[in-house]
């Protein structure tokens, strides 16, 4: 049976890179997009060029009727095996006190309500072997002060959604995981009024540069693939080996040794990590994540976050 995967927000940025990567890996791909038909069809042409079937379907993921139509269209290609919850939006960067209610509601509708509606459809339709990957953000733990705290809060909710859904669907053999990118070079920064943010913020990223969409796509493709069949664990937003050491002098990047004691400066939710796992294709570190394979909670792979604790 061929893999049929829906990628929301698949016309540009991380979604477009993911659709292309999945097609190259043998997936038939359904590209969900909101308004940019030309961009979605360009990605669809690349899917076809890779020898895979595909569809480009307009859908506002905050509208349950449009979400259902998106999933109904995907059924034309066969049983659904994968969902990439990626469609996202932010609002103008600025102090929390200046946040407009309209902007808040739009961010919640797209980044949270849309994820919930799509995940709900996937839960209704997927069978054993299915997989969901939610695109979260390093902002969920960093908080994005002075920029978009409301967006960060919604991404933290995405992590909670991932944890709960992973536990609920695990007995049915359906995996739910997430990736948590840091600053990635996409159009979302222009929408927030800071198109040069990937460059101006490079100084606070350990590698000295923003990530690229294809580097995130590699992690998503890995989590949808057969090599990730046991990957379900609690979120652990990780920093790279180049991250400054903590006050106790220990580098936050682990070399593979088990560490179960609380780590200085980190909330308790980030303790209890288990054995390390191989590098995720497309990541910028040799040790991007750790995994307790017996757990039913999800993997959250942090990609290119800033070095701030």
Image (spheres, rainbow, N blue to C red):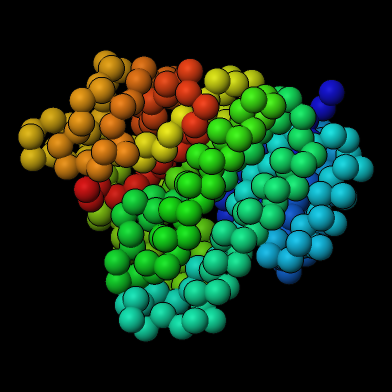
Q: Where is residue 208 in the image (x, y as percent from the top left)?
A: 29, 48
Identify the residue at image location x=42%, y=21%: 292
88 or 280: nearer the viewer: 88
Residue 112 visible: yes
Q: Is residue 72 above or below residue 299?
A: below
Q: Quadrant of residue 168?
A: top right
Badge count = 0
Q: Position of residue 100 (x, y in %)?
A: 46, 83
**Which residue reaches farthest right?**
76
Q: Is residue 53 above or below residue 88?
A: above
Q: Quadrant of residue 264?
A: top left
Q: In which quarter of the image is residue 109?
A: bottom right
Quadrant where the N terminus lies?
top right
Identify the residue at image location x=45%, y=77%: 92
The answer to whether 138 appears left or right of 18 in the picture is left
The answer to whether 61 appears left or right of 298 in the picture is right
Identify the residue at image location x=71%, y=37%: 82
Q: In this view, does 210 lie above or below 53?
A: below
Q: Where is residue 162 in the image (x, y as percent from the top left)?
A: 53, 42
Q: Where is residue 76 in the image (x, y as percent from the top left)?
A: 92, 43
174 or 56: nearer the viewer: 174
Residue 212 visible: no
**Which residue reaches farthest left?**
248
The answer to whether 191 appears left or right of 309 in the picture is right
Identify the residue at image location x=68%, y=65%: 62
């Amino acid at each position: 049976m061929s893999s049929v995967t829906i990628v929301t927000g698949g016309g540009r940025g991380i979604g477009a890179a993911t659709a292309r990567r999945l097609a190259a890996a043998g997936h038939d791909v359904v590209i969900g997009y909101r308004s940019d038909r030309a961009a979605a069809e360009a990605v669809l042409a690349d899917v076809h060029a890779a020898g895979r079937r595909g569809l480009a379907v307009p859908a506002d993921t905050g509208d349950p009727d449009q979400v259902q139509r998106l999933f109904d269209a995907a059924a034309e290609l066969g049983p659904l095996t994968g969902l990439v919850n990626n469609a996202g939006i932010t609002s103008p960067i600025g102090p929390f006190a200046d946040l407009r209610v309209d902007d808040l509601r739009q961010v919640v509708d797209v980044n949270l309500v849309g994820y919930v509606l799509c995940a709900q459809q996937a839960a209704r339709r997927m069978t054993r072997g299915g997989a969901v990957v939610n695109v979260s953000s390093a902002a969920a733990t960093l908080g994005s002060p002075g920029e978009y705290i409301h967006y960060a809060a919604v991404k933290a909710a995405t992590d909670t959604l991932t944890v709960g859904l992973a536990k609920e669907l695990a007995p049915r053999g359906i995996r739910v995981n997430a990736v948590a990118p840091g600053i990635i070079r996409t159009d979302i920064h222009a929408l927030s009024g800071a198109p040069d943010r990937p460059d101006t913020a490079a100084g606070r990223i350990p590698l000295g540069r923003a990530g690229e969409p294809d580097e995130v796509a590699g992690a998503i493709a890995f989590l949808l693939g057969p090599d990730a069949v046991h990957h379900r664990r609690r979120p652990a937003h990780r920093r790279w080996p180049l991250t400054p050491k903590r006050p106790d002098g220990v580098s936050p990047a682990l070399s593979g040794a088990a560490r179960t004691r609380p780590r200085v400066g980190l909330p308790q939710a980030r303790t209890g990590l288990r054995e390390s796992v191989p590098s995720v294709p497309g990541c910028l570190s040799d040790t991007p994540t750790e995994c307790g394979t017996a757990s039913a909670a999800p993997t959250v792979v942090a990609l290119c976050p800033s070095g701030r604790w």
